[in-house]
Image (cartoon, helix red, strand yellow):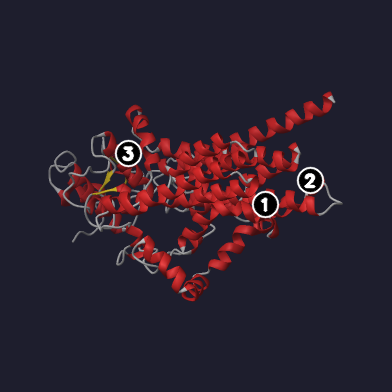
Amino acid sequence: MKSVVIRSSILVKSLKVVMFCHFGLFCAMGMSRHWGYLTSINDLGVFDQVVWNTLNGAFSQTTINPVGAAMNWLGFHFQPVLLLFVPLYRLHAGVEWFIAAQAAALALAAWPIFLLAEHLLKSEKAGIAWALVYLFNPFLLSAGKWDFHPITLAVPFIATAFLGVVKKNGKLLFWSSLAILLCKEHLGLMIVGFGILWWIRHRTWKTAAVISGLGFIHLFMVLGVAMPYFSPIGKPVMLGEGLGQLSRYGWLGGSPPEILQTFLTRPGFVWQRVLDMGGHIYWFLLIIPFSVVLPLVGFSFLLPGLADLAANTLSANPMPRSIWAYHSAGVVPVLTAAAIGGAARLSRLQGRFSAKEFRGFPWRLPWFAAIFPCRSPLRALSTSGNRSIILTGRIRGCGRCVRCWIKIFPFRPRPISAPNSADGVIYSYIPGVSARPMVSCCAWTARPPILTICRLIRRVFPKKINPTGWTGTCRWIAPNISLP
C-alpha cells in the first residue's frame, strides 16, 4: 500500500512539473516575441493602451479602433478583467503582465481538469492522462503562442466550474461563473449552460435557476445596455456594418433580437451560410483530439460551450475557426470535460469495461492529434524578417550602432488627447512598439516601416531626435532610402 501511495505522489508531482514547464515555455515564448518586436497592435497594443489610460484617468479609453475616434473599449469588447491589471501597471507599466497571466491561466487549468477526470473515472492515472491531453490540445497550443487575449483568463475558471457541477459544489460554481463573466461579452450564455447542466445532473432547481439567471442578466445588461451605451455606433461594434473584418455578425442582424429572429425565421439560410463558411470542418477539427465520439457521448457537458462555439462558427471572419488562432481557447476545457464525461458514460454502458480500464482508449488519439501543431508555436518565433529573433528576443544589429537603435523613452500609446486615430496606423506597422521604449530600424527593411518610424519620431519627439526635422531624421536613420 505504501508503494502505491508513493507512486501516486510521484505521478501528481510529475503533472505539476509538466504544468510548470508548460507555463515556462509559453511565458518565455511570449516575452521573446514581445522583446523581439513580433507582438502586434491587434490586440496586445490595445490592451496595453486601455490599461495605461485607465491608470492615468481615462477609463478604458482607446484610440486604436476602426471608428476613427477615441472610444471606450467596453463598447467593442466587454472585458472588465483588464481592470485587474491597473494596479500591476502602477508597479511596472508593461505588457509582460499580460503574457505571464495568459501562460499561467492556460497551465493552471490542467489541475481542475485532473480533479474532474479523477472524480468521474475513479482513477488518478486517468486524471493525469486527461490533464496532459488538455495541455497538449492543438487549439490550446495555438492560443498559448498568440499575443495575450482575455478569453484565455477564463479557461481555468471554466474547468473549475465543471468541477463544481460534478462535485455538487454550488459556491465553487457561482464564484467561477462570476470570474468567467469578466472575460467576454457573450459568456453569459455559457453560464446559462452551466445552470442547465447543474439541473440535468442534480435535479435541484434553485441553484440551476440562480446560475442561469446570472447568465441571462449578464447577457441583457452587457449586450442590451452597457455595450450600446459605450459604443460609438449605438450597438456592439461587431454587429455593425461597413467595418471590414470586424463586422462579423452583421449578416445575422443588427441587434440580439434581430439575430434571434433570423435564427427562428430563416434557419435554412443560417445553416447554409455555416456550411459555406466551413463550420462543419471547424467542428470536426475540434473533436478529432478527443477520439471524435467521446465529446458527443458526453453531450450534456457541451452545453456551456455553445457560447464560444456559436461565436466562432457564425463569424463572417474565418479567423475564429482557425486551428492556429486563439479564439477556441474557451472551447478546449469544455470539450475536454465532455470527453471525460463521455468516457465515464461509456464505461457505465459497457458492463465489461470499468472506468479504470476504459481510460486508456480516449487519450491515444489525442496524443497523435496534438503532434502536428506542436511546431506551430515554435514557427511563430521565426516569422520576422530578422531570423536572429529566437527565444532571447535579441536583434542582431546592422553594424551601424548609432543608427541601429532609436531611443524613445518613455514611450507609450497616445492617450485619448491624441489628435486623431492615426497613431493606430503608426503602431500597426511596428509590432510591439505600443509598450517598448525602443524601436529597431533594422528589423524591418521595407520602405513604409522606415518612413513610419520617422513619422512616429516626428509626432512624439519632433525636436529631440534630430533638429533638422523629418527628412533629416529619415536620412539619419537610413541614408540610402529615397524620400518622397
Give the left or right position of residue 41, taking residue 293 as reference: left
The spot of residue 67 in percent (x, y) is 25, 58
Which is more N-terminal, label 2 or label 1?
Answer: 1
In this rendering, is residue 484 above or below 186? below
- Single out the residue that lies furthest toward the right: 352
Task: Name the residue located 71 percent from the left edge and 42 percent from the top edge.
Answer: 120
Q: Which numbered circle lies on residue 405?
A: none
Label 3 neighbour load within 10 Å: few <14, some 14-19, many 20+ = many
Q: Residue at x 41, y 47 (%)?
A: 218
Going from the N terminus, do you reach mark 1 or mark 3 first?
3
| Foreground pick, 380 / 355 | 355
Q: CA distance from mark 1 to mark 3?
A: 38 Å
Q: Which residue is mark 2?
A: 355
Q: Which residue is mark 1?
A: 339
Horizontal and vertical percent position of residue 413: 27, 43
Quadrant the C terminus occupies: bottom left
Is residue 423 among the parts visible in the rendering?
A: yes
Residue drawn where x is 70% and y is 32% of the image: 12
Q: Secondary structure at mark 1?
A: helix
Residue furthest out toward the front: 205
How would you rate the neighbour count of disc 1 (Cα within 10 Å): few for under 14, some for 14-19, many for 20 or more? many
What residue is pinned by disc 3?
51
* Earlier-in-chain disc, 3 versus 2: 3
Towards the viewer: 457 or 328: 328
Is label 2 in a helix, a strand or a loop? helix
Q: Is residue 153 visible?
A: no
